[in-house]
Amino acid sequence: MISTNDRLDRALVVEVVFRKDESRQARVDESLNELVLLADTAGAKVIRRVSQERQTPDPAFFVGKGKAEEIRAICEAEDINLVIFDDDLSGVQIRNLEKIIDRRIIDRSALILDIFGLRARSREAKLQVEMAQLKYNMSRLAGQWQHFSKQYGVIGTRGPGEKQIEVDRRVIKKRISVLRDKLDAISGQRFLRRTRRSEYPKFALVGYTNAGKSTLLNVLSGAESFVENRLFATLDTSTKKVFLSPSIQCLLVDTVGFIRKLPPDLVASFKSTLEEVEFADYILHVVDVSSVNFCEQIDVVNETLAQLGCSMKPSVLVFNKVDRVSDFGVVRSVLNEYNGNSVAISAERHMNLSQLKDTMIRLMGSDIVEKSFRIKPTESEKLAKILSVAELVQESGQPGNLLHLKVRMRKRDWEILRREIHA
Ligand SMILES: Nc1nc2c(ncn2[C@@H]2O[C@H](COP(=O)(O)OP(=O)(O)OP(=O)(O)O)[C@@H](O)[C@H]2O)c(=O)[nH]1
Ligand SMILES: [Mg+2]
């Protein structure tokens, strides 16, 4: 946690608008709002926001030296002890800024890693976060030993600069290799679990953090996963069985939320957790349609899915939290724009969930077959067998006479059933 004592950290956040990049100009405010939310999640109170327009980042200070001095003055005047940059800083920049500003300096990635550290509950999540933090620190070690030693007093004794860095680097590499072995072992167990359950089609819930993935998992499965109106409530995967109709079941797996500028070390370290997405048959992409940035959030999630090699998986776009949208025209136009497999729901208010389930069944189309049967009055056993795996779509005829049935079921069940009833 970034708060090291009882008192909340008092933070100042810094954004740099690069003039060359016009699209960034428009997005920068949102990025900064999100940074404030991230800081709040980590337990810091943001007192001030500072921005600077530049052509390129300053290699030594990221912002200009004069700006850094201005930040120091603000920190002194307002009793601020933590400065957070919205962009990634190099080790050298962090060290130089700390010298001038004389406060702890962190960047967005460090903040996200900090929150993950705070949120990690399972052994696997803890190991994954530690791995990501070590990699992050290793990449910023050059010329930055002072800073590093403040965060991890356990590694080595204080030695003269670069020599100590070599010692630290060796220690970190060793630890990373130990962590990798442990994570591989857990990943192996996960593989066994996964193959045992693979008889059901699997949907992965993906989406921007706070979109409502865990809430949706809970309402569809009747489970009670952790839900919170904060970022990164879920770090562990959790798989539940869900009835899409009385006879059609699927597995639904909840996983970690995405965010813009997710540190690459983190994505790499959460590989085995994110494998749940890779191994899923289908994707439910949950979007908080009440957020003003939902379009950009969709792009961020799609980019992350592409990084994971999952962009081609059949998916449903689930526009959640419609109860918070007062203008239904917006929802309608969104559904028109993303026509195809999209549906507007409210997980919390249980709105349109049956429509969502129907959409999921439709997506499984190739996996589901529809069959028609004529059942004689004497064939009650056959009827029972059919109805034990299939769902009734249509029925005609009178009891005691020939019955016409139209049913649907999973292909796999049909393969077994056809042998049993000699169809
Ligand atoms: N109004 C409204 N709020 C919702 C709805 N669905 C979820 N929420 C709220 O949104 C917040 C985030 O929900 P979660 O289910 O934890 O979101 P998540 O996508 O799992 O978030 P992470 O695990 O952080 O990635 C909670 O406060 C939920 O109560 C909805 O349909 N309507
Ligand atoms: Mg969640």
Image (cartoon, grey):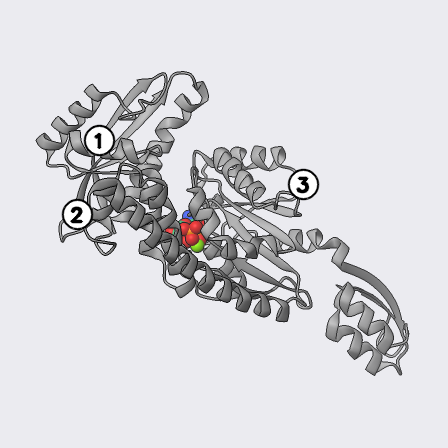
Q: Is mark 3 within 8 Å of ligand 1?
A: no
Instruction: Identify the residue at horizontal 23%, vertical 56% (top origin).
Output: 154
Q: Residues within 10 Å of mark 1 (few under 14, many from 20)?
A: many
Q: Nearer the viewer, mark 2 or mark 1?
A: 1
Q: Earlier in the sequence, mark 1 or mark 3?
A: 1
User: For the residues marked 2 and 1, what is the alpha-carbon distance in whole angstroms?
Assistant: 22 Å
Q: Residues within 10 Å of mark 3 (few under 14, many from 20)?
A: few
Which amino acid is tagged 3? Gly
- Image quarter (top left, top right, bottom left or bottom right) of the C terminus: bottom right
User: For the residues marked 1 and 3, what is the alpha-carbon distance in whole angstroms?
Assistant: 50 Å
Position of residue 147 in the picture relative to residue 285 (left or right): left
**Which corner quadrant of the image does residue 136 belong to?**
top left
Q: Position of residue 25 (x, y in %)?
A: 39, 21
Per the image, the residue denoted by label 1 is 97
Per the image, the residue denoted by label 2 is 8
Q: Position of residue 202 (x, y in %)?
A: 62, 59
Q: Position of residue 294 (x, y in %)?
A: 48, 36
User: For the residues marked 3 and 2, what is the alpha-carbon distance in whole angstroms?
Assistant: 47 Å
Residue placed most toward the observer, 204 or 132: 132
Instruction: Identify the residue at horizontal 46%, vertical 62% (top origin).
Output: 181
Q: Secondary structure at mark 1?
A: helix
Q: Secondary structure at mark 3?
A: loop
Which amino acid is tagged 1? Leu
Per the image, the residue denoted by label 3 is 340
Instruction: Identify the residue at horizontal 26%, vertical 34% (top origin).
Output: 94
The answer to whether the residue labelled 3 contacts the one labelled 2, judged by CB atoms less than 8 Å apart, is no
Q: Earlier in the sequence, mark 2 or mark 1?
A: 2
Q: Position of residue 101 (x, y in %)?
A: 16, 31
The answer to whether residue 230 of the structure is visible from this angle is: no
Q: Is residue 186 above or below residue 166?
A: below
Q: Is residue 256 above or below residue 335?
A: below
Residue placed most toward the observer, 382 or 92: 92
